[in-house]
Image (spheres, rainbow, N blue to C red):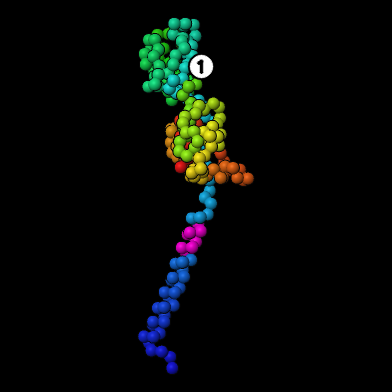
Amino acid sequence: MGGTTEDIRSETREKTMGKTSAGFWTVLGVMLLGGCAHQPAVKVDNSEQPYRIGREDVLDIAVWRDAELSRTIPVRPDGFISMPMVGEVQAAGRTPTELAESLKQSFQSYVQEPRVTVIVREVNSSRVFVTGEVTHPGAYPLRGRVSLIQAIALAGGFTDFANSDGIVVIRSDGNGGQIPVRYSDLISPDGGQDVMLRPGDTIVVP
């Protein structure tokens, strides 16, 4: 004869718990596999950006037909320049065209139809910073377009303790933010997307 009602209930509970346990471990396994799977690369904006004047840059400011207002002048550490008649003018953070337009507006009270041209004579502010587990951490001048791989090479490469797949690029421009980078992706045959650096970027190699 079959078991008692209590036996049947007990057997049913054991089967249900077994199925629940199996389901739990199946879901856990899927989650673990998902966590170990390769994550898609972060989309990086590598488009050309207009140059923005920085501190310690040297500027040629020319006012057409007005030699007294035209001059070669460095940008001070506070980001300003001092100009005749108009006084203190913010230069850092602006493009040469933006600064020229600002000066033009300021000179209109003193000069009839001023024409202003701004040229960056010396680029002294454009730097990137490499810190952490590299051979020679420090600040490096940014001359033209420099990639993350090139910057790490300038810093002497990784130390023996570096976690090259845990790199973070800290971007200090208007958008800010952090860009995680796996070095193994950059040098893989698939050709991972390199990061073109911008002035003020800091590369952290843990």
The answer to which quarter of the image holds residue 75 is top left
Q: Position of residue 81 (x, y in %)?
A: 40, 16
Residue 20 location, quadrant: bottom left
The percent coordinates of residue 58 (x first, y second) are 47, 17
Q: Is residue 60 visible?
A: yes
Query: Which residue, given by chain and number where applicable, does mark 1 sit on?
Result: 121
Q: Main secondary structure of the magenta part?
A: helix
x, y percentage for residue 19?
A: 45, 73
- 127 is higher (above) or lower (below) than 39: above
Which stretch appears magenta? 27-34
Image point (46%, 63%), residue name = 28
Name above or below for residue 54 compared with residue 83: below
Residue at (41, 82) in percent of width and height: 11
Residue in the image at 54% along x and 32% along y: 154
* Residue 93 among magenta residues: no
Q: Residue furthest front?
A: 160
The answer to which of 98 and 141 lies nearer the viewer is 141
Secondary structure under the numbered disc 1 in the rendered image = strand
Report the amino acid beneath label 1: Arg
